[in-house]
Amino acid sequence: MVRIETPRSVAEVYLQGATVTHFQKHKEAPLLFLSALSRFEDNAPIRGGIPVIFPWFGKPADKPSQHGSVRTRAWILAGTKSNPDGSVEARFTLPPCAELPSIAVEYLVTVSEALSVELIVTNQSASEFTFENCLHTYFTIGDISKTTVSGLKGVEYLDAMDNFARKTERDDAIRFKCETDRVYVNTTHTTEIHDAALRRTIRVEKENSVSTVVWNPWIEKAKRMTDYGDEEYKSMVCVESGNVRSEEIKLAPGGTSSLKVKLSSNPAS
Ligand code: TA6
């Protein structure tokens, strides 16, 4: 695990999946949620932080597991650097593997007042490489019943709780009253998480992403998840940034694709 300290914040990244599990500005609550029951063992994904989902999202019929293969692999810390602005950057690389021939994968984590992460995929093969990507971020919130997500009004979404039926978001303040699992499509919008309990607004800015996933497992699913506390749905929400399902990426030979997310927080406006 790599611990990064800056004058204003601290972060922790596990080599397992290059998973950022912790980010906290001094004098503020942790920004990322990490389940108290998360397993830290081989071949088990870490339950929380920012799981790196690649090269597929969800569980396509022809894939061996949920949410890709790299979140349970050991990445390499390839380098760190301190920037003049006081931020610190850690660079992680995915060791070559047979199931991703000639695909180079790099992940940059930049820690400052904000937390930025960037997943960079380069197609070094001679043929087109099709993949999905998603930075599956779990956020700490004070009370899900007093939390809303804004920025998606008018955006269409696929409702995983209704057979992925296509719907349109009518509210600017998305509230949580049941299991919520939505893939918002064709959206580059910045979203905000309004946490009335912690009196904080979290901002999720993204680059090169047209899919935003909003998820809270709620009561029954929380009970079914063995690496997640029954009550933990009350203190987390996922707002995920990527390119998933029909918005998958087709990368030409020699091409590079970057997915970037910047997370910041301020006292509630
Ligand atoms: O966040 C969207 C989602 O696909 C949900 O359907 C839920 O399965 C969640 O990811 C967690 O997936 P995981 O494999 O980490 O348990």
Image: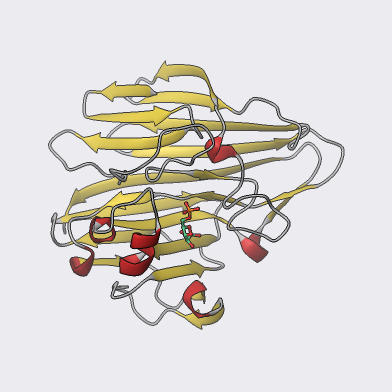
Asked if residue 150 can be seen in this view, the reply is no
Q: Is residue 5 left or right of residue 152?
A: left
User: Which of 87/47 is in front?
Assistant: 47
Work out whether 3 lies above or below 220: above
* Quarter where residue 221 is shown: bottom left
| Count of numbered circles on the image | 0
Identify which residue is drawn at 35% across, 38% down: 115
Q: In the image, residue 34 lies at what x, y percent?
A: 31, 43
Identify which residue is drawn at 31% across, 46% down: 35
* Quarter where residue 98 is shown: top right
Asked if residue 107 can be seen in this view, the reply is yes
Work out whether 195 lies above or below 75: below
User: Which of 262/3 is in front?
Assistant: 3
Which quadrant would the N terminus be assigned to in this image? top left
Which quadrant would the C terminus be assigned to in this image? bottom left
Q: In the image, residue 127 lies at what x, y percent?
A: 86, 43
Q: In the image, residue 229 lies at what x, y percent?
A: 29, 53
Q: Is residue 143 left or right of residue 4?
A: left
User: Which of 109/69 is in front?
Assistant: 69
Identify which residue is drawn at 39% across, 82% down: 170
* Quarter where residue 120 is shown: top right
Q: Residue furthest right?
A: 126
Q: In the image, residue 192 lies at what x, y percent?
A: 31, 60
Identify which residue is drawn at 53% across, 32% down: 107
Work out whether 182 lies above or below 243: below
